[in-house]
Amino acid sequence: MPLAVNLANQLGDALSFAFGMFWEILWALILGFGLSAVVEAVVSKSEMRRLLPDDSPRSIARATLLGAASSSCSYAAVALARALFRKGANFTAAMAFQFASTNLVIELGIIMALILGWQFTLGEFVGGPLMIVLLAVLFRLFLSQRLVGEAREQADRGVRGRMQGHAEMDMSLQGEGSLWQRLRSPQGFTATATHFVMDWVSVWIDIVGGLLIAGALTAWVPDSFWRSLFFTSHHTFAKFWGPLIGPLIAILSFVCSIGNVPLAAVLWNGGISFGGVLAFIFADLIILPILDIYRKYYGWRMAGFLLATFYATMAAAGLIVEFLFQGLGLTRTQRNAKVETANIHWNYTTVLNIIFLAIAAVLVRRFIRTGGLPMLRMMNRPLEPPHEARAS
């Protein structure tokens, strides 16, 4: 009986930590997804392929900017990158786009600042472009045209992956008038609401999973384990070890996109290095389920190549930012990331949550009233080409 009570108390603590983190970041999630939806509403996916013809610095820069503007969950980013590659985009540019669309987006920066601190947000937006540059260099040195040809042959088979339908949807605004006029139009309102709801649907599993795992780790894993794992008593070695083990933990966590930020908070409080946190967050594109998607999309050899090069660039970017920020005095030293039990008070967090929940309700209502619910069935399957749809 005492054992059952103890287990129940531990489970309650884990759920309390998970809900406490969720309550702290709820308004920021809605704000981030709302801003992201506005950006996505004005970025046309149909134009991306034309702008990414090769792996020149100009194309890589375009891919980075387009990816940052086309905010996606990790699964949708991977699916969209393959779609761009199949339609003629350069493979390196498609991978740069994929990196940017998960690591250089508005909502991720907001959540990181709220939970981990502004230093990590700055580190993310410095390390992200650095990681893309390193990736482009490695691809230029080691990626053979034969391997790209094999990957294209596999990609053209059109094997389905998670969030493929979401990646292919394009609700971007077209027409005349200023950007503000288009956003204020009924079509702009609908496009923004659609992207907002679709982005939430695509990542809610990762957010909930990340919160629950973070809560469980906080409640059940003792600090001594983390200190031992991260070699906190060996300060110099820990700085090199953190970016190496961070991606490995991410691979095994099964959580990607924004869902890994709560886990990063647990790791930071546990003693992992500043660069280790960044490398862990960068590694949302090499978790085990996504590695399996690479195998389906591009074949075994390319999947292995992506794992090796992605891992190397993620670890290297985390390490470089670690020492760069240390030299500039920007590295965060306080290990007080917001990992708290559920404790709701009438404060600014509660007020902001109420305001942004009301905004979310307006967007969801618009999505439903404009026929959005049938679109949800397309989230995990490719869209039919227009001529096929008419033929049926």
Image: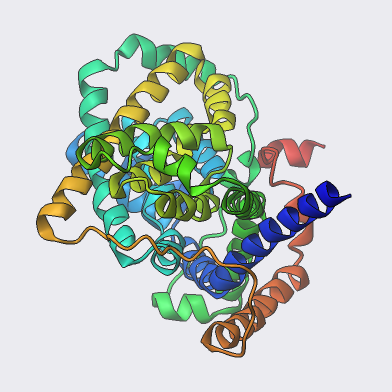
Viewed as shown, does residue 250 lie left or right of 240?
A: right
Q: Residue sitting at 20 percent across and 39 percent down?
A: 236
Q: Is residue 221 above or below residue 177?
A: above
62 and 253: which is toward the camera: 253
Q: Residue furthest right?
A: 1
| Residue at position x 70%, y 72% in the image | 364
Q: Which residue is farthest front?
A: 2
Residue 376 vertical placement versus 290 (above, below): below
Position of 345 compared to 42: left or right? right
Q: Residue at x 42, y 55 (%)?
A: 269
Q: Nearer the viewer, residue 92 or 121?
A: 121
The spot of residue 391 in percent (x, y) is 78, 36
Residue 302 percent across, percent down from the top left: 43, 17
Q: How many marks?
A: 0
Q: Position of residue 380 (x, y in %)?
A: 70, 41
Rendering coords of residue 75 (x, y %)? 56, 40
Observer-nearest of 227 and 255: 227
Residue 53 visible? The answer is: no
Q: Quadrant of residue 315?
A: top left
Q: Residue at x 10, y 53 (%)?
A: 327
Residue 122 in sight from this viewpoint: yes
